[in-house]
Image: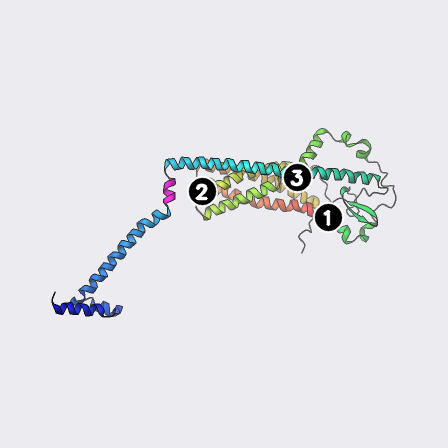
Amino acid sequence: MTPSSKHSLLITRLKPAPSPARSLARWATPSTSFTMANLSGCAAVAARTSSIMTRQLPWLLFTRARKRKSPENAALRDRNTKGNITMIRILLTATFILALLPMQAGAQDHDHGAHDIQAEVEHDPVPNTLCPVTVDEPIDPTIFVEHEGKRVYFCCNRCRKQFLENPEGYVGNLPQTGDEAAVHSHEKDHGPSEIQSSKERFIRFAGKFHPVTVHFPIALLIAALFSEILGALFPVKRFREAARVLVNLGAPMAAIAAALGWATGLFAKYPGELEQVLSTHRLLGTSTAILALTTLVLLESYWRKQTSSLRTAYLAALVLTALLVGITGHFGGTLIHGTEHFTW
């Protein structure tokens, strides 16, 4: 290279970078060979970097997914999954048993309190055996208020609430003498053992567990739907496995809760419009139990056959089941708190 060419090269290096328009205009001239070489080198480096990132980035992101595909890891994952499912079932069973113990103790205390209240009713010189709000309805000895030094008994909490809002409107329906108390009471005179068989007593006792069991299908089936939604948003198999466990637990509990609900409804008496609410609640509860069991059958069929049609049918059934279980629970709460519970 001659001194003049070295001098021109140094000047070229010291000059500021030309604008893109001037560079494009100079690319066609022979004097721009050095600039073209630099651009070619940069393009090669960029291509090399892009190639490396294209090959390495997916490998970094999906390394664990590749490792899971090996037979050894698949077998280990299956064993871990089965162990996790077994542990979840054990924990849920233990939670269910622990939840039953205090509730049963509270139910026994409630029964003792009911017997004490019943004894007070029997010794009350002028008890009202019929509800003053909903006339001709027998009272519930556990629902009462103190009014003018006397206890007034009602058939349900809704009637008690209406009486407290306007006592003067219902005081006239209360007995003024002891004639009503002297009316023949078949259960009081002959005892419950003569009019109730052991089968009826067992059904009544079983029905007391309905308020305990209804919370499990509500929570489990709705949680199963949320797990499936998370599994659709994030491609993680554990969400679908969790949904499978939840449905396997929630569907049988829905059937048990429905059966206990029928046992409770056989002896339940509700006034006026609450009788229609009871019929609706009973119909929805039975439908929910049947649909929940159908969802369970579709789910297990899908896991065995892995077909898209079974998957679609299972998801549709699960959505309907989650909606029905929520609506059924709402009507059940209406029976306890009354139709005006959500009044603004």
Residue in the foreground of this view, choosing between 69 and 80: 80
Numbered circle sitting on residue 158: 1
Q: Label 3 crowding class (10 Å Cα cut-off): few <14, some 14-19, many 20+?
A: some
Q: Which residue is mark 3?
A: 103
Residue type at mark 3 is: Met
Question: Residue 193 is drawn in which quadrant?
Answer: top right
Q: Label 1 crowding class (10 Å Cα cut-off): few <14, some 14-19, many 20+?
A: many
Question: Which tag, 3 or 2, sits closer to the chain's start?
Answer: 3
Residues tagged 1 and 3 counted as in contact (Cβ below 8 A): no
The mark closer to the camera, 1 or 3, is 3
Residue type at mark 2 is: Lys
Real-space Cα separation, disc 3 to disc 2, in angstroms: 36 Å
Q: Secondary structure at mark 3?
A: helix
Real-space Cα separation, disc 2 to disc 1, in angstroms: 48 Å
Secondary structure mostly taken by the magenta-highlighted segment of the chain: helix
Q: Secondary structure at mark 2?
A: helix
The residue at the point 82 percent across, 33 percent down is: 189
The span picked out in magenta is 63-69
Residue 302 in the image: x percent, y percent?
46, 38
| Image side of residue 87 versus residue 164, left or right | left
Residue in the foreground of this view, choosing between 293 and 89: 89
Residue type at mark 1 is: Arg
Question: Which tag, 1 or 3, sits closer to the chain's start?
Answer: 3
Numbered circle sitting on residue 237: 2
Residue 13 in the image: x percent, y percent?
21, 67
Q: Which quadrant: the C terminus?
A: bottom right
Is residue 251 located in the magenta-colored stretch of the structure? no
